[in-house]
Image (tube, rainbow, N blue to C red):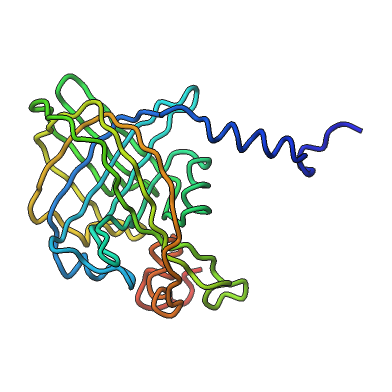
Amino acid sequence: MARVRYGARTEAEIAAARTASSKLPGIWSTGVVALWESDPDAVAAVLPPPLKPTGRPLVRVGISRVDLAGHPLGAGSFAVAATHDGVEGWYPLVMPMTHERALIGGREVFGEPKKLGEVTLGRDGLVVHAALARHGIAFVEVRGAVSGDLPLPEPVQKTDFSFKFLPAVDGSGFDAEPVLVHCLRSEKVRKLERVTGDVVLRESMYDPVADLPVRRLVEITLGEKTTDLRGRIVERVSAQALLPYIHQRYDDPRQILDGPPPEGSF
């Protein structure tokens, strides 16, 4: 009988796949990062417990292009500064990706809020333009011009916070207790430039980042970096405390509106 590819793999095949994934070479990406101070109350409002605001109401958007062989990837992240148990890091609200394969590890393994979307990054001479778009709306746009080189930072480990959970089969709550994950990113930069420009946030019912306005732009940079990611579960969290925030993960407009849709709208 011919090989049935949906059939069980052998132990040798499973071991070979695990070995191959552990030997992936360092993958470099080119990306724009914009950082700004926003409204303190708005930043605090999007943080599920036990996450808390830091001393500054910072918001960060990253828009990157990863030149994988034959499969270029666009990757984005819109995150707010947060702290947990003495650790400062970032809580991503939405992470658009251009490939479904890029969603799997982030969503299923780490609980990251990755969604399929359009991610664009371009440079024409000194002019830089980057954007994140979903459902036909470019809800974040970063534009400007390169204005000089910046010193390279030392390799650093950064922390992202995410909640790993599965909605219950019966539609009420979760199938199991949700957990808080610390995603640890070891980052090395080989090129960094300053960008003089601005950030535009557009209204979107699916990605309402406009609620976190740019009060004071801190910096925009363009750089080349490589990142190694690992994660660990740090604690189980209250299902009741997390439930009011799960609409951050999904696109159903009924989870976003304050009330039910008008009669006859479906």
Does 152 sit left or right of 70 as displayed?
left
Residue 187 sits in quarter: top left
> Residue 211 appears at what percent x and percent y?
22, 62
Q: Considering the image in quadrants, where does the N terminus appear? A: top right
Q: Name the residue furthest right.
A: 1
Does 69 sit left or right of 1 as displayed?
left
> Residue 229 appears at what percent x and percent y?
41, 43
Residue at x-position 14% and y-position 51%: 36
> Residue 91 appears at what percent x and percent y?
31, 58
Which sits in the foreground, 236 or 99? 236
Residue at x-position 47% and y-position 54%: 110
> Residue 190 appears at what percent x and percent y?
25, 26
**Number of marks in the image?**
0
Which sits in the foreground, 164 or 33? 164
Q: Name the residue furthest top.
A: 125
Residue at x-position 33% and y-position 60%: 205
Residue at x-position 74% and y-position 35%: 12
Please tell me whether residue 204 is drawn above or below residue 9 in the rendered image: below
Please tell me whether residue 211 is drawn above or below residue 261 in the rendered image: above
Does 141 sit left or right of 11 as displayed?
left
Please tell me whether residue 243 is drawn above or below residue 221 in the rendered image: below
Residue 172 sits in quarter: bottom right
Please tell me whether residue 254 is drawn above or below residue 197 in the rendered image: below
Does 147 sit left or right of 226 as displayed?
left
